[in-house]
Image: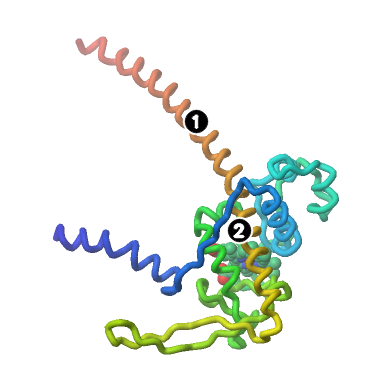
Amino acid sequence: MRRLILALILFLPASIALANEGGIELQKAHTDINDKASLQAGAKLFVNYCMGCHSIKYSRYQRMAKDLGLSDAEVMKNLMFSGDKIGDTMTIAMNPDDAKRWFGVTPPDLSTIARARGTDWLYTYLLSFYLDPKRPMGVNNLVFKDVGMPHVLWDRQGWQKAVHETVTDAHGNKHEVIKLELVDKADEAKAKSYRLDVLNLVNFLDYAGEPAKLQRYSLGWKVILFLAIFFIFAYLLKKEYWRDVH
Ligand code: HEC
């Protein structure tokens, strides 16, 4: 029995990891949240291409301005569209019910996605959309099978198609692997600069996860303070009750 439990503990994480990525090797995202130019480029892409559908509701425009080394005026001019105020959080106007009708699933808030999925996963995800006429949006994704999101950055990358190949490993076993190739070879230079776009976007999402982390820490302290005060009262009450018993 003990061995079975041990086997389960050892095996489960591996099987979950494989299920998530469909056995696809993740590409390394060499992000650096201290690189301000990269964060600024990522923020610009995010508000232009992603915020139609995804919020990052724990981030505030003003805080972002400060962290990214931009003035409030620059952020208002280049990174805000919808009549929001500089002190607002980065929410979106799209109604979740409409979104569900359009995409079959509501696009999630991306505040903590970098920590939930990891930056390598995000990087690989954004690089791995490919044409699939069987899907409602006309695309599928190597690391997110049957994804409900369209390839919103296709004009910056060019379209990719999946090519199935059979490879034989060192033990003589045959495996089918899927590789992605550009449909139009002329898009090669574009696809290369798209990798930089994606790196900047992932860097920005990684940064956006930080204010949320700080918020959680401050909440954590409040909880600990509450417990400490509660402990004092509980202790005094206990002393009071036991006084009569002794
Ligand atoms: C037209 C709407 C739309 C736009 C624009 C859009 N997405 Fe999405 N996105 C979705 C939907 C819908 C899903 C949920 C997919 C699913 O669960 O099948 C999603 C899912 C995701 C996920 C996976 C979340 C998870 O559950 O792990 C990531 C990451 C993501 N989007 C990033 C982005 C980024 C980055 C951009 C901008 C480049 C972007 N999205 C633009 C609709 C959109």
Q: Quarter for ligand 1?
A: bottom right
Rendered location of residue 38, percent (x, y): 67, 54
Q: Residue 152: x, y in percent?
A: 69, 71
Seen in the picture, residue 151 relative to 47 is either above or below; the reply is below
Badge 1: residue crowd in 10 Å (few <14, some 14–19, many ≥20):
few
- Relative depth, front residue between 171 and 17: 171
Q: Nearer the viewer, mark 2 or mark 1?
A: 2
Confirm whether residue 1 shows in the render.
yes
CB at mark 2 closer than 8 A to ligand 1? yes
Residue 98 appears in the rendering: no
Q: Which residue is mark 2?
A: 202
**What label does residue 221 carry, if any?**
1
Please state if 224 lies on the left or on the right of 1 as rendered.
right
- Residue at horizontal 80%, vertical 41%? 71
Whether the residue carrying mark 1 lies under 8 Å from ligand 1 is answered with no
Res 107 → quadrant: bottom right
Q: Is residue 214 above or below residue 188?
A: above
